[in-house]
Image (cartoon, coloured by chain):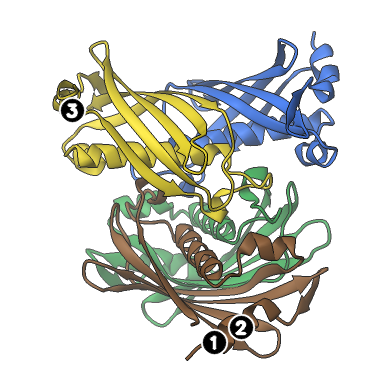
Chain colours: A yellow, B blue, C brown, D green
Amino acid sequence: MKSFELEMQVRDYECDIQGIVNNAVYQNYLEHTRHEFLHAMGCDFNQLRLAGWEPVVIRADIQYRASLRPRERFRSTVTLRRSGRLRFIFEQKLIRLADHCVLLEGEITGVFTKNGRPVAPDPFEKIVASSG
Amino acid sequence: MKSFELEMQVRDYECDIQGIVNNAVYQNYLEHTRHEFLHAMGCDFNQLRLAGWEPVVIRADIQYRASLRPRERFRSTVTLRRSGRLRFIFEQKLIRLADHCVLLEGEITGVFTKNGRPVAPDPFEKIVASSG
Amino acid sequence: MKSFELEMQVRDYECDIQGIVNNAVYQNYLEHTRHEFLHAMGCDFNQLRLAGWEPVVIRADIQYRASLRPRERFRSTVTLRRSGRLRFIFEQKLIRLADHCVLLEGEITGVFTKNGRPVAPDPFEKIVASSG
Amino acid sequence: MKSFELEMQVRDYECDIQGIVNNAVYQNYLEHTRHEFLHAMGCDFNQLRLAGWEPVVIRADIQYRASLRPRERFRSTVTLRRSGRLRFIFEQKLIRLADHCVLLEGEITGVFTKNGRPVAPDPFEKIVASSG
């Protein structure tokens, strides 16, 4: 298994003066989804860090297709894959429940560092390997 | 003139459990810089909106190269250019003052909508046209 | 009915450099709980505003008793009561699920304004009146 | 010297759907001001923590008197005093520059903990003692 999904709902304080979820808040949604995914896979973010693996995002490429408004519910999906020896990529989507509209598509690239240097993402091996 | 820059400083509450500025907060920095830029150009964000021009980000492609820590000072730069008839692109960088390290490079693509439909970004014409 | 409760869970991005939920974020939790409460009572926050009732917080008195850490689950409770002719008070608590520890007690005082002036909180009459 | 002040400006992303700064964001302003104050006094927040002193807010009593809107500039003032043997209190105000309107008054009570137990706030002794 290398995919995961989560249901969330917009909170009013996440909306800005335009009456829609602020662009930066979507990154909060995406990060939370990745961390819940990792936890479900047995790779808790804070335990990884305590074990000396420091996950770092090196690129976020996000396409905003439609906006979320107060109280709207959405599905947040994520799929993990390797990219080369050091990088891993989370492919993420947010999909509104009411009309199945794809609101956002993002590709978040990360690396693990240990003592400040990038290292092969061993903790992710079993997750990626188990994909069907 | 189509370029602009701003000096900012990390506030402690912007840092997360890793002791560095959270990835989402950088989008706050980038948005703030764009809005200050527009204001300096005579295109205040909220006045644009009141005039019926709704600016919307459709893509954010951000490369995170190094992290910011509490109290660090940085320069935030932005350059605006057209892309096709409807899109405009903000090229943005964050540069640490202490060592001139480029922390982040981002390309933020936007459109203007009027009554829900994309329209040519007339308010930006004079800004882009005035570039040397 | 004038009481309400909600279950929530700490998200990693809500924690700051001390590894605990940042003090400001608790106000997000409290606001979200109040808005969910109002919605459940048939007084949706954004519909109130569209109808010309602008709810405004005039005081927040919050006692922080213990900290929340990443992924901890908690119960957020709220009770509404009138105070004088114009004010209403939300009594709020956050309680950790694991050990029933009361993490926070807050008293949030609000008023409704209409055209900029405080008015009697008519929309809340039926909620408060229905308490047992 | 036990007083300090700072000038700040509202950023658009700090405003919510009501077009004003969100209540929680004021706590960010207050925290940032306290930390800048401590730094100016030679008591940097993160260095205190590294030295084993963990500052914790135990109460925030905030009176919201008027709202801040996009781009408004304001002065943030803070005064520190002892309260009993273990507690210290920051008296804080936000004042709009344009009309000297007092927007917010807050009393933030804190303690220091060491190894999880409250201790006398020695690092603050010289600050409070130096007041005139």
Q: CA distance from mark 1 to mark 2?
A: 6 Å
Using a 10 Å C-alpha cutoff, classify the residue at mark 2 as few (fewer than 14 neighbours), some (14 to 19) or many (20 or more): few
Chain letter behind tag 2:
C
Amino acid of disc 3? Ile
Is residue D43 shown above or below B79? below
Is residue C36 shown above or below B93? below
- Quarter of image, res B85: top right
Amino acid of disc 1? Ser
Whole-percent x and y of residue C44? Answer: 60, 64
Whole-percent x and y of residue D13? Answer: 62, 44
- Asked if both marks, 1 and 2, belong to the same chain, the answer given is yes
Nearer mark to the viewer, of 2 and 3: 2
Using a 10 Å C-alpha cutoff, classify the residue at mark 3 as few (fewer than 14 neighbours), some (14 to 19) or many (20 or more): some
Q: Are marks 3 and 1 in contact (CB under 8 Å)?
A: no
Q: Would residue D86 be visible to someone looking at this image?
A: yes
Which residue position is annotated with label 3?
Answer: A127
Is residue D101 shown above or below A6? below
Label for residue C130?
1
Whole-percent x and y of residue B61? Answer: 52, 21
Amino acid of disc 2? Lys
Which residue position is annotated with label 2?
Answer: C126
Q: Are marks 1 and 2 in contact (CB under 8 Å)?
A: yes
Q: Secondary structure at mark 2?
A: helix
Q: Secondary structure at mark 1?
A: loop
